[in-house]
Image: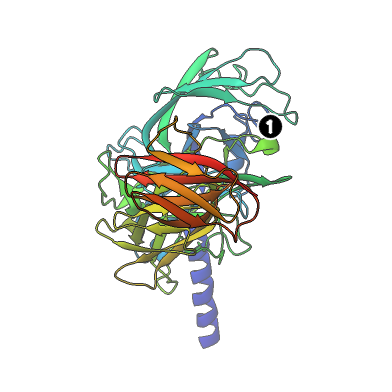
Amino acid sequence: MIMKRVLFTILCIVVAGIASAQYINRVFDYKPAPGQFINVSPWGTPAAIDGVIGGVYGNMTLGAFGGYVVFGFEAPVVNDPQNPFGVDFTIFGNAYSDWSEPAVVFVMKDENGNGLPDDTWYQLAGSDHFFSSTKINYEITWENPGGASALDIPWNDNFGNSGLLEVNEFHPQSWYPSQEFFPEIDPLEYMLSGTFIDTKIDTSSQGIVKSYVRTFGYADNHARGVGDHLIPDNPYTSEIENSGGDAFDISWAINDRGEYVDIDQIDFVKVQSASMGSAGWLGELSTEICGAADVAPDPQLKGEDKVLVMKDLPLVLKSSSLQLESAFFIDGRVVPDARFDYAVSSDIAYVDEESVLHVEESGILSITATLASNPQYTCTQECVVELSTGIDMASDDPTFSVFPVPATDFVNVKSVRPGIYHLFTGNGQICLSGEIEPSVQQIDVSHLNPGFYILSVIYSDGKQIRKFMIQ
């Protein structure tokens, strides 16, 4: 009898666990942006709706920036702190290692109780939301180039920019949503608006394209795992531990003033493509989703709840200064007064008290941000520095000259004012630096290889630049 009671109890727990699992059961709106999978099944027609309902292995593209889908679950998704890592639902896409096509996620509570997504949307603020590169209320207008085959699609935005969404040879159909599949979309042009986040696309390796993963808070951002898709990953760590995909906490919700709001449960979710970029032969960045799952409570499943995020460095830095940005999060909410220390890997650069990076020569640079109050939390980024020599030769000035030209063991610098000099190689690397006195000053260059060099002398009110040769 005791054994039967135990088995019955276990069975009830298992059945309860299965019953608590819920997936997308309604799609209220599907409005994609242009893209390479549009107008083709299974990814880019209304037939994709059936695929994302009831599971996590569907196929739906949202296209390039602004494309979106609005869906709901059978029952409200509760904001439950007893859930694993505090997250409430997981969205699955087709991201993989070094490949992210991030989408911003919005949530809505059915406050008027009519079962429709016609109340207030709240954005779930992800790791990049507070960086200066993020654009709120970004608007893009897509124009139909016409025809039934693939043609580059013109676009313009509310910042005065314009360009083309360039097609590729692998997807010959029209990339603009057709009237056959999307009759509600204007056949001439239409505007989409949302939050734009900057992405880091790397095409530096031949045949390999990377779109680097955001830290947390975006759909189609992390790869699917091999674990149970009802057991979420910790969004504050980089490892794929359980289901993979992208887990979301309703507590990340912000209002239109950027303030965090407390919502006890939500009924509707909006997923919207948030990036804009070309991945070469892979086509445009376009969010895809495969489904979503509610998360069941499990207070035993806990982990790291803090993370430091550093704004991406450019792949190649070509300027001599750059404002660094970092953010620190606890339970996914940004800490507004967090302070950071920065360390650089080389003496070619330094970071000042205003978190501005100053670079003095070309090379490979690694920068580490550390939380000032707790050095346990760090974030490191790398970039290649390629400084222009900035040759902007001044006109003849009798108060400044460099001689003899060509030089051999020494070069003389005539100046009537004190200043700081930097001697650059022809490819922009600093090889000598020092002070210039108001006189004729001799600089030893005997140890330098023959070739062209650039001397830059910086004064309080400007600079002088001369190019010369060492034999």
198 or 430, nearer to the observer: 430
> Mark 1 — residue?
41
Picture coordinates of residue 302, whole percent (x, y)? 42, 71
**Residue pictured at 69% horizontal, 15% vertical:** 148
**Residue pictured at 68% horizontal, 38% vertical:** 282
Q: Pointer 1: residues within 10 angstroms few (<14), some, or many (20+)?
A: few
Determine the residue located farthest toward the bottom in the rendered image.
2
Picture coordinates of residue 91, whole percent (x, y)? 51, 50
Left or right of residue 39, residue 326 in this image: left
Which quadrant of the figure has residue 52?
top right
Left or right of residue 322, residue 142 in this image: right
What amino acid is found at the position of numbered circle 1 in the picture?
Ser
Name above or below for residue 195 compared with residue 6: above
Q: How many marks on residues?
A: 1
Do we see residue 160 in this rendering? yes
Q: Secondary structure at mark 1?
A: loop
Do we see residue 91 in this rendering? no
Picture coordinates of residue 43, whole percent (x, y)? 64, 35
Picture coordinates of residue 346, whole percent (x, y)? 49, 63
Colour theme: rainbow
Name above or below for residue 108 compared with residue 40: below
170 or 327, nearer to the observer: 327
Left or right of residue 448, residue 380 in this image: left
